[in-house]
Image: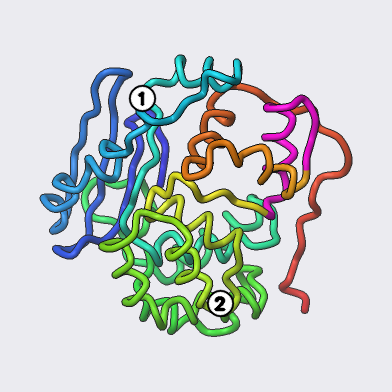
Amino acid sequence: MVFDDAGVWLAYRTVAGPVTLLVTGTRTEVRLRAWGSGASEALHQAPQLLGLDDDWSDLDTSAHDLLASSAHRNPGLRLCRTGRVLDSLAPAIVEQKVTSAEALRAWRILVTRNGEAAPGPAPERMRLPLLPEHWRRIPSWEWHRAGVDPRRSKTVIQAAVVARSLERSTAVHTGGHDLWRLLRTVNGVGGWTAAETAQRSHGDPDAVSFGDYHLASWIGSALVGEPVDDDGLAELLEPWAGQRQRIVRLVLASGFRPERHGPRMTIQDHRGH
Protein backbone atom coordinates (compact mmCIF):
# COMPACT_ATOMS: atom_id res chain seq x y z
CA MET A 1 0.00 0.00 0.00
CA VAL A 2 1.28 3.45 -0.96
CA PHE A 3 -0.21 6.87 -0.14
CA ASP A 4 0.59 9.82 -2.39
CA ASP A 5 -1.09 12.90 -3.88
CA ALA A 6 -3.01 10.69 -6.32
CA GLY A 7 -4.67 8.62 -3.59
CA VAL A 8 -4.18 5.18 -2.06
CA TRP A 9 -2.41 2.61 -4.24
CA LEU A 10 -2.89 -1.13 -3.68
CA ALA A 11 -1.13 -3.93 -5.55
CA TYR A 12 -2.24 -7.53 -5.16
CA ARG A 13 -3.27 -10.69 -6.98
CA THR A 14 -6.74 -11.90 -7.89
CA VAL A 15 -7.77 -15.23 -9.37
CA ALA A 16 -7.75 -13.52 -12.78
CA GLY A 17 -4.27 -12.07 -12.30
CA PRO A 18 -2.36 -9.16 -10.76
CA VAL A 19 -3.87 -5.73 -10.29
CA THR A 20 -2.94 -2.23 -9.23
CA LEU A 21 -5.87 -0.39 -7.67
CA LEU A 22 -6.02 3.37 -7.08
CA VAL A 23 -8.57 4.51 -4.48
CA THR A 24 -9.55 8.17 -4.24
CA GLY A 25 -12.61 9.97 -2.97
CA THR A 26 -14.31 12.31 -0.57
CA ARG A 27 -16.53 11.85 2.48
CA THR A 28 -19.44 10.96 0.18
CA GLU A 29 -17.84 9.28 -2.82
CA VAL A 30 -15.18 6.67 -3.60
CA ARG A 31 -13.53 6.43 -7.00
CA LEU A 32 -11.58 3.43 -8.23
CA ARG A 33 -9.21 2.84 -11.14
CA ALA A 34 -7.53 -0.48 -11.86
CA TRP A 35 -4.83 -1.84 -14.15
CA GLY A 36 -3.67 -5.37 -14.94
CA SER A 37 -5.29 -8.66 -15.87
CA GLY A 38 -7.07 -8.74 -12.49
CA ALA A 39 -8.58 -5.26 -12.91
CA SER A 40 -12.15 -6.38 -13.63
CA GLU A 41 -12.23 -8.83 -10.73
CA ALA A 42 -10.68 -6.28 -8.37
CA LEU A 43 -13.33 -3.69 -9.21
CA HIS A 44 -16.04 -6.32 -8.66
CA GLN A 45 -14.58 -7.18 -5.24
CA ALA A 46 -13.89 -3.57 -4.23
CA PRO A 47 -17.09 -3.09 -2.15
CA GLN A 48 -16.02 -6.00 0.10
CA LEU A 49 -12.46 -4.69 0.26
CA LEU A 50 -13.70 -1.26 1.35
CA GLY A 51 -16.09 -2.66 3.97
CA LEU A 52 -19.45 -2.01 2.30
CA ASP A 53 -20.98 -5.08 3.99
CA ASP A 54 -19.51 -4.27 7.42
CA ASP A 55 -22.67 -3.63 9.44
CA TRP A 56 -22.30 -1.45 12.57
CA SER A 57 -26.04 -0.99 13.14
CA ASP A 58 -26.14 -3.23 16.25
CA LEU A 59 -23.22 -1.52 17.99
CA ASP A 60 -24.42 0.51 20.98
CA THR A 61 -21.91 3.13 22.15
CA SER A 62 -24.37 5.33 24.01
CA ALA A 63 -23.00 4.43 27.45
CA HIS A 64 -19.59 5.98 26.76
CA ASP A 65 -19.16 9.60 25.69
CA LEU A 66 -15.87 9.16 23.80
CA LEU A 67 -17.17 6.17 21.83
CA ALA A 68 -20.50 7.82 21.07
CA SER A 69 -18.74 10.98 19.90
CA SER A 70 -16.31 9.04 17.72
CA ALA A 71 -19.14 7.02 16.16
CA HIS A 72 -21.01 10.25 15.41
CA ARG A 73 -17.97 11.94 13.86
CA ASN A 74 -16.89 8.87 11.85
CA PRO A 75 -20.12 7.56 10.29
CA GLY A 76 -18.28 5.96 7.38
CA LEU A 77 -15.84 3.96 9.51
CA ARG A 78 -15.70 0.38 8.24
CA LEU A 79 -13.59 -2.75 8.73
CA CYS A 80 -11.99 -3.67 5.43
CA ARG A 81 -11.76 -7.27 4.24
CA THR A 82 -8.98 -8.15 1.79
CA GLY A 83 -9.95 -11.81 1.39
CA ARG A 84 -6.24 -12.70 1.12
CA VAL A 85 -4.89 -14.58 4.13
CA LEU A 86 -1.19 -15.08 3.37
CA ASP A 87 -0.88 -11.45 2.25
CA SER A 88 -2.06 -10.48 5.75
CA LEU A 89 -0.40 -13.26 7.76
CA ALA A 90 3.14 -12.92 6.37
CA PRO A 91 3.60 -9.24 7.31
CA ALA A 92 2.00 -9.86 10.71
CA ILE A 93 4.61 -12.55 11.36
CA VAL A 94 7.41 -10.21 10.28
CA GLU A 95 6.02 -7.63 12.76
CA GLN A 96 6.26 -10.00 15.75
CA LYS A 97 8.23 -8.59 18.71
CA VAL A 98 9.88 -5.76 16.74
CA THR A 99 9.22 -2.07 16.17
CA SER A 100 7.11 -0.87 13.26
CA ALA A 101 10.18 0.74 11.69
CA GLU A 102 12.11 -2.51 11.83
CA ALA A 103 9.21 -4.50 10.40
CA LEU A 104 8.64 -2.04 7.54
CA ARG A 105 12.32 -2.10 6.64
CA ALA A 106 12.39 -5.90 6.58
CA TRP A 107 9.21 -6.09 4.52
CA ARG A 108 10.51 -3.56 2.00
CA ILE A 109 13.75 -5.48 1.51
CA LEU A 110 12.08 -8.89 1.12
CA VAL A 111 9.29 -7.80 -1.23
CA THR A 112 11.44 -5.46 -3.34
CA ARG A 113 14.07 -8.15 -3.77
CA ASN A 114 11.72 -11.06 -4.50
CA GLY A 115 8.48 -9.51 -5.77
CA GLU A 116 7.21 -8.64 -9.23
CA ALA A 117 6.51 -5.11 -10.39
CA ALA A 118 2.91 -3.96 -9.99
CA PRO A 119 1.03 -3.42 -13.29
CA GLY A 120 0.01 -0.05 -14.71
CA PRO A 121 1.23 3.37 -13.56
CA ALA A 122 1.97 2.22 -10.03
CA PRO A 123 4.38 4.23 -7.88
CA GLU A 124 8.04 3.50 -8.52
CA ARG A 125 9.29 0.21 -7.04
CA MET A 126 5.81 -0.87 -5.94
CA ARG A 127 5.67 -4.67 -5.90
CA LEU A 128 3.01 -7.37 -5.84
CA PRO A 129 2.75 -9.52 -2.70
CA LEU A 130 4.82 -12.67 -2.79
CA LEU A 131 3.24 -15.97 -3.75
CA PRO A 132 3.73 -19.01 -1.47
CA GLU A 133 6.45 -20.36 -3.75
CA HIS A 134 8.27 -17.04 -3.60
CA TRP A 135 8.38 -17.14 0.20
CA ARG A 136 9.62 -20.74 0.19
CA ARG A 137 12.46 -19.89 -2.20
CA ILE A 138 13.96 -17.01 -0.18
CA PRO A 139 17.41 -18.18 1.01
CA SER A 140 18.46 -17.83 4.62
CA TRP A 141 20.97 -15.06 3.90
CA GLU A 142 18.24 -12.82 2.45
CA TRP A 143 16.15 -13.18 5.59
CA HIS A 144 19.31 -12.37 7.56
CA ARG A 145 20.02 -9.30 5.40
CA ALA A 146 16.47 -8.06 6.04
CA GLY A 147 16.95 -8.46 9.79
CA VAL A 148 14.37 -11.26 10.17
CA ASP A 149 15.47 -13.88 12.69
CA PRO A 150 15.21 -17.62 11.91
CA ARG A 151 12.14 -18.10 14.12
CA ARG A 152 10.06 -15.58 12.16
CA SER A 153 11.36 -16.65 8.75
CA LYS A 154 10.54 -20.28 9.53
CA THR A 155 7.02 -19.28 10.57
CA VAL A 156 6.43 -17.38 7.31
CA ILE A 157 7.64 -20.37 5.30
CA GLN A 158 5.38 -22.73 7.27
CA ALA A 159 2.44 -20.42 6.58
CA ALA A 160 3.30 -20.44 2.88
CA VAL A 161 3.29 -24.26 2.85
CA VAL A 162 -0.33 -24.39 4.11
CA ALA A 163 -1.45 -21.19 2.37
CA ARG A 164 -4.03 -22.91 0.17
CA SER A 165 -5.99 -24.29 3.14
CA LEU A 166 -5.74 -20.95 4.94
CA GLU A 167 -7.11 -19.08 1.93
CA ARG A 168 -10.20 -21.31 1.88
CA SER A 169 -11.19 -19.89 5.27
CA THR A 170 -12.37 -16.67 3.61
CA ALA A 171 -15.27 -18.59 2.11
CA VAL A 172 -16.52 -19.98 5.44
CA HIS A 173 -15.42 -17.51 8.13
CA THR A 174 -15.98 -13.83 8.84
CA GLY A 175 -13.91 -14.18 12.00
CA GLY A 176 -14.27 -15.65 15.46
CA HIS A 177 -12.70 -18.45 17.47
CA ASP A 178 -12.74 -21.07 14.71
CA LEU A 179 -10.73 -18.80 12.43
CA TRP A 180 -8.29 -17.87 15.21
CA ARG A 181 -7.74 -21.56 15.99
CA LEU A 182 -7.09 -22.30 12.31
CA LEU A 183 -4.48 -19.54 12.04
CA ARG A 184 -2.78 -20.72 15.21
CA THR A 185 -2.25 -24.20 13.76
CA VAL A 186 0.75 -22.62 12.03
CA ASN A 187 3.64 -23.13 14.44
CA GLY A 188 4.84 -19.70 15.59
CA VAL A 189 1.49 -17.95 15.13
CA GLY A 190 0.07 -16.82 18.45
CA GLY A 191 -2.91 -14.79 19.52
CA TRP A 192 -1.54 -11.38 18.48
CA THR A 193 -0.58 -12.56 14.99
CA ALA A 194 -3.88 -14.40 14.48
CA ALA A 195 -5.84 -11.30 15.50
CA GLU A 196 -3.83 -8.96 13.27
CA THR A 197 -4.37 -11.32 10.33
CA ALA A 198 -8.10 -11.82 10.97
CA GLN A 199 -8.63 -8.06 11.14
CA ARG A 200 -7.03 -7.54 7.72
CA SER A 201 -8.03 -10.62 5.72
CA HIS A 202 -11.51 -11.24 7.13
CA GLY A 203 -12.58 -7.88 8.53
CA ASP A 204 -13.11 -9.67 11.84
CA PRO A 205 -15.25 -7.39 14.06
CA ASP A 206 -14.17 -9.13 17.28
CA ALA A 207 -10.43 -9.76 16.82
CA VAL A 208 -8.37 -7.78 19.34
CA SER A 209 -4.56 -7.72 19.26
CA PHE A 210 -3.94 -8.79 22.84
CA GLY A 211 -0.21 -8.77 23.51
CA ASP A 212 0.35 -5.57 21.55
CA TYR A 213 3.04 -3.33 23.02
CA HIS A 214 0.79 -0.25 23.36
CA LEU A 215 -2.83 -1.24 22.70
CA ALA A 216 -4.08 -2.15 26.19
CA SER A 217 -2.59 0.99 27.70
CA TRP A 218 -4.05 3.17 24.92
CA ILE A 219 -7.57 1.76 25.06
CA GLY A 220 -7.61 1.71 28.86
CA SER A 221 -6.54 5.34 29.04
CA ALA A 222 -9.30 6.28 26.60
CA LEU A 223 -12.11 4.32 28.22
CA VAL A 224 -11.37 4.59 31.95
CA GLY A 225 -8.66 7.25 32.21
CA GLU A 226 -5.73 4.99 33.08
CA PRO A 227 -3.58 2.30 31.43
CA VAL A 228 -4.57 -1.34 31.79
CA ASP A 229 -2.94 -4.67 30.94
CA ASP A 230 -4.36 -7.32 28.60
CA ASP A 231 -6.59 -8.80 31.31
CA GLY A 232 -7.94 -5.35 32.05
CA LEU A 233 -8.50 -4.71 28.35
CA ALA A 234 -10.45 -7.96 27.98
CA GLU A 235 -12.65 -6.94 30.92
CA LEU A 236 -13.24 -3.45 29.51
CA LEU A 237 -14.25 -4.78 26.10
CA GLU A 238 -16.45 -7.60 27.39
CA PRO A 239 -19.70 -5.56 27.11
CA TRP A 240 -19.08 -5.38 23.36
CA ALA A 241 -18.20 -9.06 22.85
CA GLY A 242 -18.53 -9.90 19.18
CA GLN A 243 -17.71 -6.31 18.18
CA ARG A 244 -14.58 -5.56 20.20
CA GLN A 245 -12.46 -4.61 17.20
CA ARG A 246 -15.03 -1.98 16.28
CA ILE A 247 -14.60 -0.44 19.74
CA VAL A 248 -10.83 -0.39 19.26
CA ARG A 249 -11.24 1.32 15.87
CA LEU A 250 -13.55 3.94 17.35
CA VAL A 251 -10.97 4.78 20.00
CA LEU A 252 -8.19 5.03 17.42
CA ALA A 253 -10.39 7.21 15.20
CA SER A 254 -11.45 9.46 18.07
CA GLY A 255 -8.30 11.55 18.10
CA PHE A 256 -7.49 10.49 21.68
CA ARG A 257 -3.78 10.11 22.33
CA PRO A 258 -2.43 8.79 25.64
CA GLU A 259 0.45 10.47 27.41
CA ARG A 260 3.80 8.85 26.69
CA HIS A 261 5.72 7.48 29.66
CA GLY A 262 8.81 5.32 29.97
CA PRO A 263 11.33 4.09 27.40
CA ARG A 264 10.39 3.21 23.87
CA MET A 265 10.89 -0.29 22.52
CA THR A 266 14.48 -0.78 21.34
CA ILE A 267 15.13 -1.58 17.71
CA GLN A 268 16.91 -4.91 17.49
CA ASP A 269 19.47 -5.92 14.86
CA HIS A 270 19.43 -9.65 14.15
CA ARG A 271 21.94 -9.44 11.33
CA GLY A 272 24.95 -9.79 13.60
CA HIS A 273 23.79 -13.12 15.08
Q: Position of residue 176 (x, y in %)?
A: 45, 56
* Region rendered in magenta: 211-228
Q: Give how far apart the Cα atoms at labels 2 and 1 are.
A: 36 Å
In screen coordinates, is 125 left or right of 141? left
At x 43% / y 51%, what residue is drawn? Answer: 200
Asked which secondary structure carries label 1, the reply is loop
Q: Residue 155 carries which label?
A: 2
**Nearer the N terminus, badge 2 or badge 1?**
1
Vertical side of 126 occupied by 214: above or below: above
Cβ atoms under marks 2 and 1 closer than 8 Å: no
**Kind of residue at badge 2:** Thr
Residue 227 belongs to the span the image colors magenta: yes
Residue holding disc 1 = 76
Q: Where is residue 23 in the image (x, y as percent from the top left)?
A: 28, 35
At x 32% / y 31%, what residue is drawn? Answer: 6
Question: Which quarter of the figure is the C terminus placed in?
Answer: bottom right
Structural crowding at the residue carrying mark 1, measured as other residues with C-alpha within 10 Å and reported as few (<14), some (14–19) or many (≥20)? few
- From the image, state whether disc 2 or disc 1 is nearer to you: 1
Q: Between residues 151 and 52, which one lies in front from this camera angle? A: 52
